[in-house]
Amino acid sequence: KSFVGNRLLGREEFLSSASFDSCTKKCAKHCVKDGELQTEFQVIDTVGFSDTTKSDQEVRQLLGEFANLAPAGIHAVVVVLNLQAGGRSNALKVLDTIENFFGKYVWAHSVVLCNMSQRTAQEMRKDLYASPGPHEEW
């Protein structure tokens, strides 16, 4: 996630790692100005929804900081799923947690990136939708 945030900013601001372990300890925000559009964009890096070092309750508390960093709301959510680290069940848990946190309409304003996988998009989609579940509504 942090790597994607850095790419969106066009510079290194968030600590990132190629490891499966989470390196973001608390939410952070950085801004970038688009010269052509004369617009300022804010990129917020959060702790992972499946943080490898924290309990689910600790992650939810840390995500509460997100609201303080975006008091006027958000325009889009970029979700980064590591399909190799946790597989399908972890990906579905992360997607469900995001929907519970932001509400069911979050998907109208989301981009989902799948990383660390050598499988094709068609293989990942087939695996993700292999069994019935809440993801059918997305």
Image (cartoon, grey):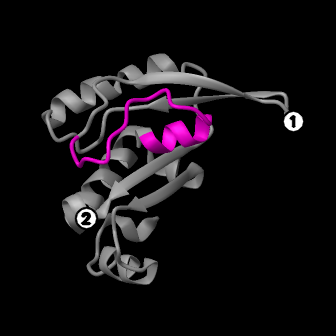
Q: Residue at x 30, y 46 (%)?
A: 97
User: For numbered disc 1, what is the local secondary structure?
Assistant: loop
- Magenta span includes 85: no
Identify which residue is drawn at 38% across, 24% down. Answer: 27
- Residue 29 in the image: x percent, y percent? 50, 22
Q: Is residue 128 above or below residue 116?
A: below
Q: Nearer the viewer, residue 109 or 104?
A: 109
Q: Mark 2 falls on what kind of element?
A: helix
Q: Is residue 136 above or below residue 25?
A: below
Position of residue 34 measured from the top left corner of the image (x, y, whole percent): 77, 32
Q: Which mark is residue 84?
A: 2
Q: Amino acid at mark 1?
A: Glu
Q: Quadrant of the N terminus?
A: top left
Question: Could you give the CA–CA distance between mark 1 and mark 2, rounded to whole angstroms?
Answer: 38 Å
Mostly what secondary structure, the magenta segment?
A: loop
Q: Which residues are magenta?
A: 3-21
> Where is mark 1, residue-wise?
36
Q: Write down the quadrant of residue 123 in the picture.
A: bottom left
Percent from the top left, x then y, of residue 38? 84, 28
Amino acid marked by disc 2: Gln
Q: Quadrant of residue 114?
A: bottom left
